[in-house]
Image (cartoon, rainbow, N blue to C red):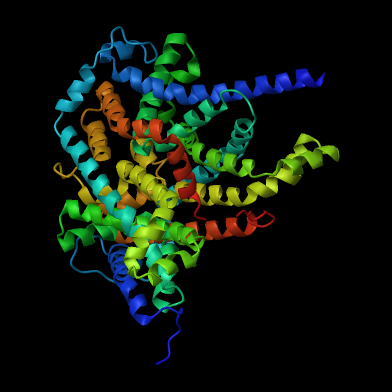
Amino acid sequence: MKRKTNGISHKRNMSYMPVIAIALVLFTVFFIIPAVYSFYFSLTDWNGYSLEYNFIGLDNFVKVFQDTDLLNSVKFTMIYTVAVNATTIPFSIFLAVLLTRKLRGVNFFRSVFFYPAIISMLSLGLIFNEIFRRMLPMIGENLGIGFLETSLLSSKGGAMLAVIILGFWQNLSIPTVLLIAALQSVPGDLLEAAKVDGAGPITRFRVVTFPFLASTLVICLVKGIRDALVVFDYIVSLTQGGPAKATTSMGYKIYLMGSMDMKFSQACATAVVLFVIITIASFVIMKVVGRGGIEQQ
Amino acid sequence: MSRKTKKRLLDAGTYACLIFWFLCIALVLYVTVVNSLKTQAESSISFLTLPESFNIQNYIEVFHRNGFVTAVVNTTFFTLISVAVVMVFVPAVSYAVNQTFPLKTSKFTLYYITAAMFVPFQIVALPLSMFMKALGLGNRVSIIIIFITYPLIQGVYLCNGYIKTIPRELAESAYVEGAGTWKTFFSVVYPIMKPMTATIVITNFLWMWNEFLISLMILGADKDTQTLPLFIYSFKGQYSIEYNLLFAAIVLSSIPLTVMYVFLQKYIVAGLAGGAVKG
């Protein structure tokens, strides 16, 4: 039997195999098998407890787009994802540009701006809950500012806005840091040359700087969209999906259906839909935004 | 307008924007800390004023609450054990894959594990919690196994990229001199991988310390194995009116990471930035 080899003796190759085997076993048993189970149960009507269940084909998947509650969770998740990324990405470019100017104190701002990234999402959700529910209405009453008096969390649109504000507040930090690094990789003489040729600051940014940011922007967007699509902690702690289920994200809905509402198979199907959305979104971004950039490294 | 005034205006504008965002961040942190030091009567007058006296009564109260100390011990235990294993395990797996690369097994391993980057945790979560209960490993072992396994997904991808940049001759010469395969790894390759190992340690430390969904699914309402995020969450449910205590609990649970951030800022920023690079 002739094998494809790597020019290393069989005995030596074998000495690496135990470690690879441990990794494969752990990963298969604790990640792949549960994931496969999810696909499997998504085709059934199992409620998570009963002893018997039936195969019902793609019914659960059809329901994701027919059931009012589920469709609403898909809609909210999309709105949240688009809103958070459409705000964080431009603002992080803006902040990164400011933070790479040679000014005194810039390092201090950098370290403060990054701090939100290390606080737990759950704690922040609880803090923002107190701010929206108690602090702002209290300030509104004391100062007689009408629109502050009712809590943002008590109306559907307001609660959605509150989740987006929290998402923006925390998720600005990592793209900013990544973009600072990318901006610092833009060769100074290239900018200088463009300046000599008479290009204004906006043209310089568009023509010279932007191509250097493209690959970083792909990373920020893929990560940002992925994180937003699976949003769970913020919802649990800030709004608990309310009011009137307006902020029930897909991630939260999956949890509710799977562990509270005895709709295990429906939860699995929704998770599969979420997986498909993430995969498609990631590939589209890599293809569309990734083009026209300069490969770094 | 002269060049100089133009630059001055630009600088002033820059500072104005930076200070504005600084205040947005500082306000949230200020509200949290200040109200953790106030009595509820003081907070109900205003969230923004400083406390009349810095009383740490809330903190003492949190310490005495059932479950807080257990949660601190559990989170510390799960995080430290898992990080210690991940720190060696992930680079070792990546190295083994790299060394045996054109072989089918290692090629398969690399794509099999890294492809999971697109899989949301939700798809695994529900069957996983049932599966873990069925295996009967107990909550502690279950959570540690998960904390050790999941870092492979991103870690193997990152380490593999990093190891490729290390010249093969380096390991080769050590091997020829008679060091075994793993001795070569620990004495030659592992030290070179330090920056990447640091990234992996930092991203996973933060993840494990703050992790909520997995712990909620696996540990559920079990008081003995409760982690800090679960404690804070249950705290919220049980004593939702005592928000001053909630703030104190949040501050306490964020202290370790904050202290780490103050001292290891450079590495944490670089680590999280490096860890995000996975598209």
Residue farthest to the right, as pictured? A197
Q: In the rendered image, is residue A213 in sight?
A: yes
- For residue A156, say whether it is visible: no
- The quarter of the picture where residue B224 lies is top left
Q: Nearer the viewer, residue A2 or B68?
A: A2
B137 relative position to B279: left or right: left
Q: How far across and how far down the image is residue A156, in percent?
A: 45, 35
B29 shown above or below A184:
above
Quadrant assignment for the C terminus of chain A: bottom right
- For this orientation, the residue located farthest to the top is B52
Instruction: State whether residue A210 is above or below residue B2.
Output: below
Residue at 31 percent of width and 73 percent of height: A15
Q: Is residue B234 above or below residue B18?
A: below
Where residue B170 appears, as percent x and y from the top left, is 46, 64
Residue sitting at 32 percent across and 69 percent down?
Answer: B180
- Residue found farthest to the front: B177
